[in-house]
Image (cartoon, rainbow, N blue to C red):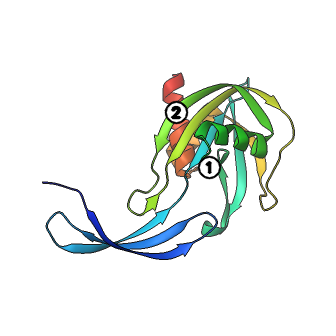
Amino acid sequence: MELMERTLSRREIYDGRVVRLHVDEVALPNGKTSVREVIEHPGGVCILALDDENRAALVRQYRYVFSRVMTELPAGKREAGEAPEVTARRELWEEVGARASEWTDLGTMIPSPGCYGETLYLYLARGLTFGEQHLDPDEFLNVDWMPLEELAEKCLSGQIRDAKTVVAVLKARALLG
């Protein structure tokens, strides 16, 4: 069976600073029609930065959508036309105040393909040198450090639930052995 859906019409709902929302009418493989609500996002990066003691940099920040402080790996949104590796270097410098001499591509992930058009690029960063944070004016976060094994256990137990963090940590752990 052919699984493709064809767009019949599109209604733009919202065009914001970070996301765009549109509602499409689509033709289904069986000839019927349905509606798809789509949130477009420019994509982002997530960085597992490990220091010389194999500790990971973590950021703790308030996440308005969930009304709580969450612990995550440093991450950020890609700017238009910006290569993912450039975004990763910029975000590590801004959020942690660190630069890395070694970068390993951990692949990509699609967080929620049912309606959210975002691709996240995951990286492992090592050989860190440090300076000061360069946070955006509306960005407030604290940096903590945790041994990679402890972080992996927290991901597996559900204590850390941020998807990009869980995926990057477990991929890196498998890669590093």
- Residue 106: which disc? 2
Q: Evaluate if marks 2 and 1 touch, with contact meaning CB atoms under 8 Å apart.
A: no
Q: In the figure, 69 relative to 12: above or below? A: above
Residue 83 position in % (x across, y down): 60, 40
Work out how far the residue at label 2 is from the one at label 1, CA to CA, in angstroms: 17 Å
Q: Nearer the viewer, residue 152 or 85?
A: 85
SS for tag 2?
A: strand
- Quadrant (top left/top right/bottom left/bottom right) for the N terminus: bottom left
Circle 2: is it few (<14), some (14-19), or many (20+) Cα within 10 Å?
some
SS for tag 1?
A: loop
Q: In the figure, 8 relative to 74: above or below? A: below
Q: Nearer the viewer, residue 158 or 70?
A: 70
Residue located 61% across and 52% down the image: 80
Q: Nearer the viewer, residue 143 or 109?
A: 109
Q: Nearer the viewer, residue 23 or 75?
A: 23
What residue does disc 1 label? 78
Q: In the figure, 4 relative to 13: above or below? A: above
Q: Toward which corner of the image does residue 122 lie, by quadrant?
A: top right
Residue located 54% across and 47% down the image: 164
Q: Left or right? Give the position of 111 relative to 24.
A: right
Q: Left or right? Give the position of 171 relative to 6.
A: right
Question: Please, what is the three-letter code of the amino acid marked with disc 1?
Answer: Arg
Residue 115 position in % (x across, y down): 41, 64
Circle 1: is it few (<14), some (14-19), or many (20+) Cα within 10 Å?
many
- Residue 34: which disc? none
**Which residue sits furthest right?**
132
Question: Please, what is the three-letter code of the amino acid marked with disc 2?
Answer: Leu
Residue located 77% across and 58% down the image: 139
Q: Left or right? Give the position of 12 relative to 62.
A: left
Residue 145 position in % (x across, y down): 74, 38
Residue 150 position in % (x across, y down): 62, 36
